[in-house]
Image (cartoon, grey):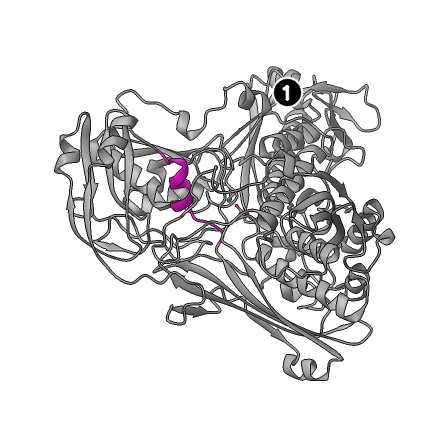
Amino acid sequence: MTGLPPDAEVLGEPVDRIDGRPKVTGGARYPSDVHYPGMAYAALVQSAVAAGTIRRIETAEALAAPGVLAVLTHENAPPLADGPASLLGPPPRYPLRDARVVHHGQHVAVVVADTAERARTAARLVRVAYEEDAPRLDLEDPGAAVTVDPYGTDSERGDVPAALAAADVVHDETFRTAPVSHCPIGPFATVARWADGRLVVHDATQWPMLARTVFATMFSVPEEHVRVLVPYLGGGFGAGLRTSPHSVLTVLAARELGRPVKLVLTRPQMFTSIGHRPPTVQRIALGATRDGRLLALHHEGTATTGAEEFNAEPITSGTAAAYACPNVVTRDRLVALNLPNPAAMRAPGHTEGSFALESAMDELSSVLGVDPLELRLRNLAEVHPPSGLPWSSNGLRACYEAGAERFGWRDRDPMPRATRDGEWLVGQGMAGSTYAWWSAPCRAAVAVARDGTAVVRSAATDIGTGTYTIGAQVAAELLGLGVDRVRVEIGDTDLPPAPQSGGSGLAVAFTGAIEEAVHQVLARFMRMVRDDPHSPLRGRRYDEVVAADGCLRLAGDPSVGESYGEILGRHGLDDVTATGECDPRSPQEGADVVRAGAFAAQFAEVRVHERLGVVRVSRVVSAVDAGRVLNPTTARGQIAGAVVMALGMALFEETGFDPRLGRVTNATLADYLVPVHADVPDIDVLFVGRPDPLAPLGAKGLGELGLTATPAAVANAVFHATGVRPRALPIRL
Ligand code: MOS
């Protein structure tokens, strides 16, 4: 009994979120809901300049305010150890290290009081005098420090200059994308409590295991003495991957005061304290034959990072694998500015890069007079272009074909500005996406109890993606139980270690670990009955039985079998537990195929008011190859949600940084425009893939996929509607 039964009953079904009821009834405990007796509350004091040195920081007035317990500044905060390097790069500067200020909004003090209101009031009484330096705030500031090839991902194949010289058509353009903010609905919060040298932190993190390592390292305590809890998180989108300075300050305050401390970021602080998607400027040169075969592709991208900080924003990393083009150069650069450090945001880098690449492809199609979809099909990467090896699975052609069919692409008049509906110009655009997911080893424990219920346990967290639900589904499917018989306990670093909820990778690794754990549990049940004279399954082998209806039954004769509870009862056991591990990366090594990511084709229709310039998106079709779809409801939610986020990036969203002060000018949800219901059209999501043979359970990560390509599809539709080419996001009136 290995692998999934071909007639899976629970996995692949549109099971409702098992965390839905606790979330909508208030039973789900988010980090900000945690309360301890004697808990104190922290409030942040943030820098009012973008660069310089603190000359004087006066805390007497704040300290004298009612209820204030402490004010920590760089003058009295003890030094910490540097944090660890991670997938996210070298460790960030720890807070309150010294008098230097490197961005507006940097935390320069933390005030702790007996209530949150008193802490916030007193925080306003801290007076800071600065010696200001001239800040660097512009991505194209020639004096800013530049890192070349910051992620080691720059690539080159063939001879691009020669191929561009030989091409029939060359198209060379510059594209720009604006900074945008994650805006998770749940304010990030940290509650820290030290007791007997052990630390418990309730933290809004997408990566509890990394948070544990960060706290253990910075506060010089063993990792086993740190427990990070995040059973529920109100969204993250990448902002919760890094352990941000406010979390470290909360842990520090709790240690200094010797009592539990809570810090909840205000909405404006959510714009300055947890990162944003940085702005980019990109150049793309395409060379092609007259009939639309790509000969050369040159893609350079520059993103920003915080001064003396690092953020991975690999803009061009998807370009080398996107098309069957013999000559490709990709280059990334990182420019350090006196702005808050950016953070990974849902398909970091790739989203901005795909806007430029897929817009450039649309421009090329228009120069050549080749249909945009046809141009992509002519250059489809039938094999993985950088290696020349076959993909483990690739449904991109099917995405294009099924999406075009559903959208009615072939009915489109190819002429720009040719279709109108009254005063509205109507246009259709499309774009394609080849997206790798990033995964790491994951463990999960599965226990089956005498009452016929099961529990899945792992340090993974659910940022709203459906992790709880697919975990229950996989265990239920493989154990032959109803989903309601499976409990999922996650978001706790005392449970088996798990990687980040990010990079579209958790679902694959987490469900693979559950699958392995279930197999071990079932193998133990079979060892228990092997020599058991009372068991109808005595002498049977593992591969002769199936799990169904809470029982193990003979595959050939389902009338022969018994329940988990009967076996456990006879053996005097309360439960059987096993821990499984999955490393989704391992099958690729030495293999003669390349592990494929997910693929998508996005089709968008826009209506642009001819006189007012208003852009409305009227339809989106997303055709997606994500391998085996574990749950079509949560999978559709991921794609549709990402499409909405992409519409925001395409049309509305821009984190405003004052060009002289580096201050965020629109740090509220009234001023920072995200799509609202009236902005969101019908989004039609269709899944066309087949299970990927290299992926555990055949699933490929899709949490970020709906975001790549979609801004380009909208921009290409705007071009088709108006004849005007948008080369910068967001697209304004
Ligand atoms: Mo995301 S940037 O994969 O959390």
Magenta stretch contains residue 383:
no
For residue 304, which quarter of the picture?
A: bottom left
Query: Which stretch did the figure color magenta?
Result: 264-277
Q: Give whichever of 117, 379 is nearer the camera.
A: 117
Question: Quick check: 509 left or right of 70?
Answer: right
Q: Which residue is drawn at 69% across and 42% down?
A: 697
Q: Give whichever of 4, 427 is nearer the camera.
A: 427
Q: Position of residue 145 (x, y in %)?
A: 38, 68
Q: Helix, strand, or loop for circle 1?
A: helix
Question: Quick check: 347 left or right of 413?
Answer: left
Question: Quick check: 91 left or right of 253?
Answer: right
| Residue type pointed to by label 1 | Arg
Q: Which residue is drawn at 21% across and 49% down?
A: 79
- 623 above or below 26? below
Q: Residue at x 35, y 41 (%)?
A: 223
User: Can residue 700 be seen in this snapshot?
Assistant: yes
Residue where numbered disc 1 is placed = 485
Magenta stretch contains residue 269:
yes
Q: Where is residue 241 in the image (x, y as percent from the top left)?
A: 46, 45
Q: Where is residue 368 in the image (x, y as percent from the top left)?
A: 79, 71
Q: Give whichever of 445, 70 is nearer the camera.
A: 70
Q: Where is residue 477 in the image (x, y as percent from the top left)?
A: 70, 30
Q: Give whichever of 96, 86 is nearer the camera.
A: 96
Q: Residue at x 65, y 45 (%)?
A: 702
